Every structure is written in structure tokens, then in C-alpha cells.
Amino acid sequence: MAEQRTVEIQVLRYHPQHDEQPAWQSYKIPFSDDTSVLQGLLYIKDEIDGTLSFRWSCRMAICGSCGMMINGKPQLSCHTFLRDLLPGPVRIEALAHFPVERDLIVSAGGFVGKLESIKPYLLPREPRALAAGEYLQTPEELERYEQFSACINCMLCYAACPEFGLNADFVGPGVLALLHRYNADSRDGGRAERMPVLNAEEGVWTCMAVGYCSEVCPKRVDPAHAVNQNKATSAADYFLRFLGPKRGPL
Amino acid sequence: MDTFTVDIAIVGAGGAGLRAAIAVAESHPALTVALISKVYPMRSHTVAAEGGAAAVTLGQDTLEDHFHDTVAGGDWLCEQDVVEYFVGHAREELVQLEHWGCPWSRRPDGRANVRAFGGMKTERTWFAADRTGFHMLHTLFQTSIRYPSIRRFDEHFCVDLIVEGGRVQGVLVIEIASGDFRVIQAKAVIIATGGAGRVFRENTNGGIVTGDGMALAYRHGVPLRDMEFVQYHPTCMPGTGLLFTEACRGEGGFLLNRAGYRYLQDYGLGPAEPTPRNKAMELGPRDRLSQAYWHERQRGRTISAPHGEVVHLDLRHLGEARLRERLPQIYELALRYLGIDPSREPIPVLPAVHYTMGGIMADGTTASPLPGLYSAGECSSIGIHGANRLGSNSLTELLVFGKVAGLEAARYVNATSHGDAASVGALAEASAARALELLTRPRATERIATLRREMAKSMEDGCGIYRTAATLQSTCNRLAELKQRYQRVGLDDHSRPWNTEWLLAIELGYLLDVAQAMAHSALERRESRGCHQRLDGFEQRDDAGFLRHSLAFYRADDVPRIDYGPVKITRSQPGTRVYGAATEAARAHG
Amino acid sequence: MSVVANRPRPYVRSMRGWWRRDPFFMRYMLREATAVGVLIYAIVLTVGVVRLAQGEAAWNGWLAALRSPWSVLLHLALLLAMMFHALTWFEIMPKTLPALLIGGRRVAAATITRGGWTATLVASGALFALAWWWGS
């Protein structure tokens, strides 16, 4: 019978009530070829140390709960596999650039607040009665924004973005990608209403085109593209505003 | 304890909860809504649904067909008047969601596209790539942001309903970040907490699908209806149970046994044709497909794999381009988790628990027998799925009945006033004390994970695809034992802020109660119907004896009492479920 | 709107040395640092223009300075920096453009990048050939 393989997992622990600062704790766990980091953490919580706290749910990289730093890189623990991190130790810490509430749990309220601030809903270009059926949208028109609509709000891009790390007011890659998703939707006419967010200092102009956000995105949303192509939009909006208020969307 | 007073409290912010909140906010903007969820709304398990949402769309499709497909799919255990309402309001809800921005996949002419799905006579399943639930949930969540009357309580865990004077008065929640209790006093409560698939070992569900709302309603005297009907999805990843959407089969995938043979033709679903045909072969209903797998396994015709016996889902003939376009998510899933390229190799799959047909008893207006309590979505049993749900009916259900729940709750509260705040507070304190006892229990001998594993294994063994009195009784006994041992479950974590272990312990309590309702309902139903199949002399459907709903009633310190309720039949008299070649014959005979 | 929670105090981690934590960030800082090279070269050229205005002796003095070993070393370093600058410039360029469609199909970012590098090589080659021919 093959001997059970084990690997060392190091987790940066922090408890708000009794820790002044975070500290590393080490565990040794069994694993097999298809064990994900999340399954490893669940093993620790179930069998070794129930005090380890982390977010998770779907296990299939669609709910966006389980983002964390694994060996220094922002990843989803549910689809990162221990087999690829051998021989270990595997170092796990809470998502970078966010305040840590406990163990691997970061404050997510700021991100959600920014998401709420960009009018992330369709502001129809033209009204349409329900009885008239769906708006027409060709596959080509859908393609123009579909990629940006695939964001699962996992915040890995924020952990990858040093500008966000240095300035927590930066609206950030994920939210700006969502903003672009609506602007690029052929049914939407709300671009003008979203410009103030884009144009603000904390909007596209904090972005320094590092590009790491798009590298780490598990859904290939390419937020760097969403943000940076809107720099031209924002600049044009700034310079062309003298042409008068009735100037339509670009 | 902080107290918040609102008109309507909604527990659960998935598809149904969000739709209900929006319905209230749109129709009655003066009413305040508390939208409570133990996770941020976009983490709700609606997000994982893949295949699509059904509604009559094409010219050749009719409401009558959708109605009949659904009722037959449910093996006639459906409330037919509710099904009629459902099919009649499906399309307008999908159009409404489109108006809110949902990126439905399109035909070249710009109209929403529809695809074939299991058990449906005509293509009527709207879809958004292969992540329909994701897009629906995000559209609903983002749309809900427009309404200031919706106050969200994100990451607040519901530990009890507050019931007084014979009606619901609000809920008690834990603010997870601090571990503090909060009371949300409300005139009406809508439960939209999802299913209970985590009761079983191998399931497609996320960690949060633990039957919370079902258990809470149940403990307060509301019957759980048809709990024995648990759906196995036939094509799931071995080991994790993760879902490979039915759309794989809608697009033309085959299911093969170890001989590379499309075995479904041996189970009344044939003949096998090279392209998908509605209601035949791989597009048969889920219960039949899961049962066919079970038989193949008994016959030794499945393939042995590290995580159990599997069959092959073959998508190779679809080609990489079509796979990447129509099924991008499952392509990634197979590649990343299994190292398998579906355009080159078949994917190993097996059935895993996916959906809970049963739930909180709800009438056609989503009202439960407890005044002020409503339910919508997977947590409720409103009567459209019967003994077996057709794929793509449940995403539509979230919208149709989420809206109904919101409107009905709004109507109710406009004619009601709040209960006495002091008695609400006292009841809340008592509930909080019970929840705290788990946390502060000094001597404990059981670990949460041990009990959870034993429960899940027992349910899979005794209450699985095929059941007998012996296996069911064994499971019932085991559950009773586990409930005893649960009294001695202990935690490692005794702190309050972000104590997720405490929440896991509370969830285990919910799971055990729901599991008991399932197992006992199954034991008492001495027939086979839909997803409830027996091998102990009750292999046939028994309309005379059991064309009725099971009702499980909670009894403290005892097993549930099982009673029965009538099934509403209107236009479709119980007949034979017709799939495969038989559908052609049936059509020919008109 | 989300009801603000009574959160316990969270821990904020320092950003000190952030760019040394990941090779990606180090590469980014190197990319940005090439701008300093651009500045240095601009100063060198500006000095050249000034020397030109000051007459033939000044001009020849500047040319002689350019041929000194330190200057050659500097210019080699600047050349490497410019090459890296051009390489990374075209890597990031597709992100700044809206999606390009040719014949209904999306032009991949990699195509735009390679196009840019090709154009750079061709233009550089042409300039070098011109300078060589001029000088001979």
C-alpha cells in the first residue's frame, strides 16, 4: 500500500481579540493528486484546528469567496492544487492590500461599496415595454462586453494592484471593469452618468498600467484593458466637454 | 442586542431572495426590506447554476406542452394549478431580467436563443453561455442596488425565526464579523435560503447549502413537504461532485459505459441517434439517467476510477470551437481539475445530489401555514417539481415565485402591524441563549466533521438513488443517534468575531433535522415515483395509495411525524412518463 | 445599501517593499525605471544641441566626449533600457486601445504586441542603415 503523502501548510493567523499582529502557524496534512488548497484548509479546520477561519462556498471558481495569497500570489484556493505546490511548505495568507479581519478573512465592505457606487445596472438607451419582448442584441454586440461581465467579484485583481495597495480609495480594476461592461452594452445609455466615477482621480487615473490584475484574474476578464481603454474616453470627455452638454456618448 | 425594525425581512439573497426584494421595492417603495444573507449575495449558490432557464418561446412551443412536460417530469406529484401559473409567467420574467441587463446568449437576429434540455418537448431553455445562474444572480444583485428601500445585512447568519401570537414577528441573526446577535423585527418574513444538498456525501452544492430556512420553519411547526424527493444530477465530477451541466447533453454529448456504448438506450430512452432528440437518450429526465447509471453499476458495466465507479461523458465530437463557445466553463473545469481536454478525451462522471425538490410547504402564493411566513426558491415546495424536477425549471422558478413572494408579503404587511417589541425581544434573547450554549459548552466529546461525515455517508447509503425499508430504517436509526451525539458536539473556537466553526455547528443542526425529514418521509412512502425509487417490493408507482404529498412535522426529542396532503390535479391525469421512442409513438397518436 | 457592521479592528499590513514581493512587480519597476534612461538620453541630446549652437569647437568637444569609454558604456546601458522600454511598451499597448475588429474577428492582444515589435525592429533597422550609409 502506498504511503500517505503529507505536505506542510503555513497559514498567517490573526485574531482581532488576542493578537497584536499576525503570526505564522504550521500544519501537516495528508493530500492526493487532486486535493485543492481549499480542501487542505477544510481538512485543517475539520480535523486539526477548528479555529482557522476562511471564506468558501462553491468549490468551482464561480462564487468568488475563496481568494487568498498562496505562495505570494493571489489565487482562488478552490482551484489551486497542492500537487502543483510541492514539495512545500505552502504559505497561505489573506488577500493582499486588504485589512485582515481574522485569519484569511479580509474586509470586503469597501469593495462592495465601490461596486454599488458605479450604477452597476442597465440604464436603457431606449425604453421598451415588457410586452414588446427582449431588446435585440446581436452576438457581436454581446461579444463587446461579455468578457467584462464574467467578473466573479473575487477581488484577486485588487490584491494584485499595487496602486490599490497604496491608495485604498482607488475604485480599482474589478469595479472599473464592471463599469465598462455596462458602458459597452449596446442596450445601455448611462455612460454619461458613470463618467464622474471614471474621471475622478480615484477612477482610471490612479491606474499605472501595471497589468498584474489581468494576469491573476481567474475568469480572464482583463480589467487592465477595461481601465486603460477608458483613459482615452476620460481624456476625450474632459477635452470635448467644451463642445456642449448635448454631445452624445462617444 | 441591536434591533432593526422593517416591514419585510428576506432571509437569503440568492435569485429568489433578490427577486422578492426587487418586487417589493418596485411595487411598494415605501416599505422597508431587510435582505439578510450569511454570505455576500453574489456568493449565493444560484451563482453555480449553469444550464439555463425555461420558458415557452418558439412559435411551435405551447404553454400546454411546458405544462405537460413539467407535470409528467414530476411524475404527477405537482400542484397543477401552480404549474399552470408558472409556465404562463415564465417568459415575462426572463424578458424582465433581460431588460435589467442579463446577457442572454443570442441568435444571429438578436433575439434570445433557446436550447434543448432534459425532458422538454421543444427547445425552450434560455441560457447565458454555460453560466446562466451566474449571470442571473449578478444581474439581480446589481439591479437591487438601485433601490434604497432594500437594506442589506450581508454576512448575517440567521439562527431563528421569532414567532409569537401565532405569526412570524421577525428573525434573530448573528453578525458574523463580530459574533453579535441582532434582532430584525418584521411583519413578514420570506425564506429564500436554498436547498439542503449538503446532507449527502457527494453533491454539487456549495458549502452554504445546508437547509437553514427549511430547518427553521420546520422547527416552528411548518411542515416540510415531499422531502424524500432528492434529485441526483447524472453528470458530476467524481470526488468533488462538481456539476457538468445538462447543457453538455443538450449540445449533443453522449453517455458511454465501459464498452463505449450509449447505454441509455437499454433503459427505455432509445433509440440512439447521432444528434440530440428531445426527451430521448441523453435528454431524458435526470431521475431516469441517474437510475440507469445505478443499474449499469450493478451490472459491472461502469469504469473503475479513484473516486468511485464512473461513466463517460463524451463531448469530443462537438469539437473544440463549439465547446469553447457554448460550454466554456465546463471546458475549464475538466481541464483544470481533471487535466482532461474534453475535445480529446471523454470526461468521467457520476451522479451526485443536486437539488431538493421538497421543502417548506407553500401554497400558490408562496404562503406557508404560518401567517406572515413565505418561501420561494429551492427551500420551498410550491408544487411545480413534484417527484422530479426538469432542468432549467428552477432558475425560472426563482424569478416567477420570488416576485410572487415579494408581492404577497407586501400585500400582507400593508394590512398588518408590528408585534410587541418587548415580547419579540424576550423571544430573541431566549433563542440567542440557545445558540450561545453551543459556543460555551464546557465538556464536549464529538467533532462537527465526524458527525457531518457520518450523516452524509448514511444518507448516501440508505437514502440514495435506490432505497429499501432496511436501508432507510438504518439511516433513520443513525440519524437519531447522530442527533443525540449532536448534544455533545464541541468547538475548538470559543471566540465571537468570525467564528465560522460555531456557524458550522449550527448548520449541522439544521442538516440533521432536514435529513430526518427526508429519511422518514422516504421510509413511509411505499411506492416508487420520480426520484424516490425502491427495491423492496415497492418498485411501482401507486397512485391509489400515494398520489399525495408527504408532510413531515417536527417533534422535539422525537422523530418527525409523517402525514399526507392532497395533490391538485386539473388538466393532466396521471399517466405514463413517455421518453425515447415512445414519445414519437405518443405524438403519432395525438 | 449594506448596513454597516460593528467590526472588530482589522489589521492593516504594510506596503513597505511591496515591489520586491513578486517578480511581476520588479519587472514593472524596471519598466518604469527605463523612463529615467529616456530622461538621461534627452539631457545628452539637449547638451548636444546647445554645443552645436556654441560653435564647431564646442560641437567637436561634445562628439569627443561621446566617444569616451564611460560614454560608450552609458550608451550601451541606455540602449538596453530603450529596448526593454520598447518591449514592455508594446506589451501594455493593447490594453490602452479599444477592442480592434478586423473582418468581424477580434484582433488578439498578442498580435498587436508582435506588430508593434516588428514595426520597431523594421524602423530601427531602417534608421541604422540610413545612418550607416550617411556616415560612409
Image (cartoon, coloured by chain):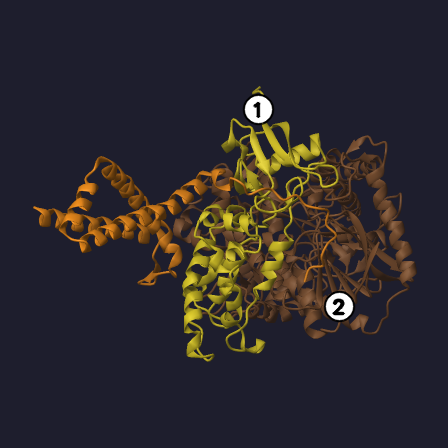
Chain colours: A yellow, B brown, C orange
Q: Answer yes or no: is residue B261 visible.
A: no
Residue occupying image coordinates x 79% and y 37%: B494
Nearest the viewer among B214 and C48 is C48
Q: Quadrant of residue B470?
A: top right
* Front position in the image: B353 or B127: B127
Q: Position of residue B59 (x, y in %)?
A: 51, 72
Please tell me how many numbered marks the rendered image carries: 2
Q: Are marks 1 and 2 in contact (CB under 8 Å)?
A: no
Find residue A131 and name its label: none
Provide the residue designation for mark 2.
B32
Instruction: Indicate the secondary structure of the residue bearing disc 2.
Output: loop
Label 1 packing within 10 angstroms: few (<14), some (14-19), many (20+): few
**Which residue lies at the image location 91% right of the left edge and 55% below the top edge?**
B426
Front residue of this view, candidates A101 and B195: A101
- Residue B385: x and y in percent read 68, 58
**Circle 2 Cα neighbour tier, 10 Å, few/some/many (<14 / 14–19 / ≥20):** many
- Quadrant containing the N terminus of chain B in the rendered view: bottom right
Compared across the picture, whether B559 is left or right of B196 comes to: right
Name the residue located 89 percent from the left edge and 65 percent from the top edge.
B419
Q: Which residue is mark 1?
A: A5
**Callout 1: SS:** loop
The answer to whether one can see residue C8 in this image is yes
Instruction: Give the camera-side residue of B151 and A56.
Output: B151
Q: Chain of mark 2?
A: B
Amino acid type, mark 1: Arg
